[in-house]
Image (cartoon, rainbow, N blue to C red):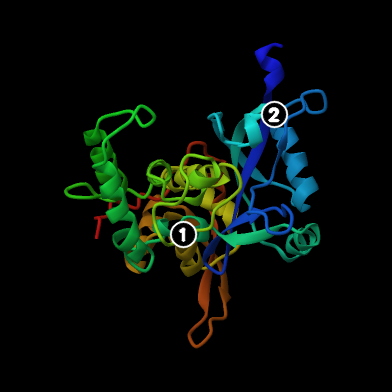
């Protein structure tokens, strides 16, 4: 039997929206007691001319959501990513996508009928949310376990010298003289997985039990949480050099709402005046002349993204600057 007969191409979508200043990730129903999953389905070239067309139809069938902005992320083809008893069945190579959408009343109603649901993105990756400061579980659970793992003797299945583990740990979590880089989302996830700190490492058969006593975020089916981490890394990178954030905003918005959305994506708190200078300096928005009534305060001015910015490719994003590990 040819190798091609044993390979299946799957398509996964990490679909992101912002609700009340919180990043949401769309998951699909997978049966009672099953783990959350990203919308996914096989690519059938006999039915669809392109993989993107196939993904759009799959997402609409599973969630009743019509996708707008979409881009390809990465191809995930590791052995064991879809573990099956006896390692039987085709090897699934999945192409991951990032999609951005707005939460609108009509779309939410259709989605609820389908059984799909929006989840807190940081519920899956809680160590990535620094908006209220450094997450406590990093120092309480993650770093002690990772430091122990980095010093363990290696066997044939792990590969690489111990020093490479220590270096990866410093780079991923911003230790010693290294700053914390919010774009290293995938590196942090892969370290946690390799060290056996995530439930997926157990379900994939990599080890018998999780190496920490408390779960680190909500697990997902197969390697969907790894795909979600890849999507977050891509989005955090793109907002710095492309105005993709407008895909998550209504046609008119306040600067406070825009800042809240950027903070939700970047996982960090931004100084209000510095943020407004960034927006003004990049000439991303223009005033509409309208205002929005604010609770307990004066009306807030409404803005929209400048048409020239939306048409320019590439266009400037928001240079958020660096951040220390503290």
**Coordinates of residue 258 in the picture (x, y in percent):** 49, 62
Label 2's element? loop
Few, some or many residues within 10 Å of mark 2 (<14, 14–19, 20+): few
The answer to whether one can see residue 323 in this image is yes
Say above or below: 57 vs 126. above
Residue at 43% from the left image edge and 44% from the top image edge: 193
Q: Is residue 64 left or right of residue 241?
A: right
Image side of residue 47 versus residue 14, left or right: right
Q: Residue furthest top?
A: 2
Tag 2 residue: 89
> Closest to the observer: 89 or 294?
89
Q: Nearer the viewer, residue 274 or 42?
A: 42
Can you say which quadrant of the picture contains the N terminus?
top right
Q: Nearer the viewer, residue 168 or 52?
A: 168
- C-alpha distance separating marks 2 and 1: 30 Å
Residue 41 is labelled as: none
Residue ID for mark 1: 215
Q: Is residue 148 above or below residue 130?
A: above
- Local secondary structure at mark 1: loop
Give the farthest residue toward the bottom: 296
Of pointers 2 and 1, the one earlier in the residue sequence:
2
Horizontal relation, residue 205 to residue 61: left or right: left
Q: Dots 2 and 1: beta carbons under 8 Å?
A: no
Residue 108 image offset from top left, x and y in percent: 73, 63
Residue 223: which quarter of the image?
A: top right
* Residue that sits furthest to the left in the current view: 177
Q: Residue at x 68, y 59 (%)?
A: 33
- Looking at the image, is 95 positioned above or below residue 183? above
Q: Quadrant of the C terminus?
A: bottom left
The residue depicted at 56 percent of the width and 30 percent of the height is 75
């Amino acid at each position: 039997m040819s190798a091609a007969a044993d390979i299946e191409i799957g398509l996964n979508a990490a679909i992101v929206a912002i609700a009340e200043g919180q990043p949401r990730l769309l998951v699909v129903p997978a049966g009672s007691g099953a783990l959350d999953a990203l919308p996914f389905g096989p690519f059938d070239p006999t039915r669809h001319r392109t993989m993107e067309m196939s993904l759009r139809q799959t997402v609409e069938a599973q969630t009743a959501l019509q996708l707008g902005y979409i881009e390809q992320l990465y191809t995930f083809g590791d052995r064991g990513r879809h573990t099956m008893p006896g390692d039987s069945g085709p090897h699934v190579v999945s192409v991951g996508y990032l999609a951005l959408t707005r939460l609108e009343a009509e779309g939410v109603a259709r989605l609820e009928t389908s059984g799909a649901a929006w989840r807190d993105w940081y519920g899956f990756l809680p160590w990535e949310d620094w908006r209220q400061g450094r997450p406590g579980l990093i120092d309480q659970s993650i770093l002690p376990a990772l430091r122990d793992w980095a010093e363990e003797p290696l066997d044939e299945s792990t590969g690489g010298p111990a020093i490479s583990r220590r270096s990866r740990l410093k780079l991923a979590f911003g230790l010693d003289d290294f700053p914390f880089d919010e774009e290293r989302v995938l590196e942090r996830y892969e370290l946690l997985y390799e060290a056996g700190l995530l439930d997926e490492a157990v379900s994939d058969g990599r080890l018998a039990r999780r190496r920490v006593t408390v779960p680190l975020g909500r697990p997902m089916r197969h390697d969907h949480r790894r795909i979600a981490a890849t999507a977050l890394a891509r989005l955090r990178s793109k907002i710095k050099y492309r105005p993709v954030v407008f895909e998550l905003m209504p046609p008119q918005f306040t600067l406070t709402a825009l800042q809240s959305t950027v903070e939700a994506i970047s996982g960090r708190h931004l100084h209000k005046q510095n943020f407004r200078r960034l927006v003004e300096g990049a000439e991303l928005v223009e005033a509409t002349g309208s205002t929005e009534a604010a609770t307990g305060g004066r009306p807030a001015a409404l803005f929209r993204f400048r048409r020239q910015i939306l048409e320019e490719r590439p266009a400037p994003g928001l240079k958020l600057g660096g951040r220390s590990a503290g």
